[in-house]
Amino acid sequence: MLVGLYGILWVLVGSLLLAGQVGTAAFHTYLGQPFVLGSLSTLEIEVVILVVGLIILGLALGLWHLRTWALALSLLFLIFVLVEYGIAHDFLSLGFLLSLVIFVYLIAVNGHFR
């Protein structure tokens, strides 16, 4: 459920960014700077955030059904996200803290997966 809520957060933020209801500055203020997206335009960044949220929701569905592939992909994704936050030196953002809590939780419950 934690991963699903995390995915919903990403989809919600991506949708709000695309709708123009939240500026990218507000996104970076609350969730931090998780990805170095180089020269992508604002629209492309918003689409990437939305797609990442949908991928996270797919992983949450696999985790809900206790699929080992979903656990492995979720842990790899969270490692990637935590490294990106580390590169950005953004250790006190909500995004980093949520990612860290979910990572530790998935490590703690990995014995329940087939």
Image: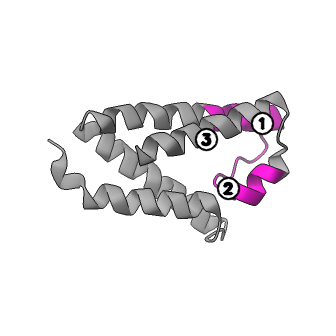
Q: Which residue is mark 1?
A: 17
Q: Classify mark 1: helix, strand or loop.
A: helix
**N-terminal of the two: label 1 or label 3?**
3
Q: Quadrant of residue 52?
A: top right
Q: Classify mark 3: helix, strand or loop.
A: helix
Seen in the image, is 15 located left or right of residue 61?
right
x then y, percent, for residue 82: 52, 61
> Three-letter amino acid code at disc 1?
Leu
Q: For marks 1 and 3, give the CA distance.
A: 10 Å
Q: Is residue 106 visible?
A: yes
Residue visible at 59% across and 31% down in the picture:
51
Categorize mark 2 by other alpha carbons within 10 Å: few (<14), some (14-19), many (20+): some
Q: Quadrant of residue 109?
A: bottom left
**N-terminal of the two: label 2 or label 3?**
3
> Three-letter amino acid code at disc 2?
Leu
Tell me the magenta residue range.
Answer: 26-50
Residue visible at 61% across and 71% down in the picture:
91
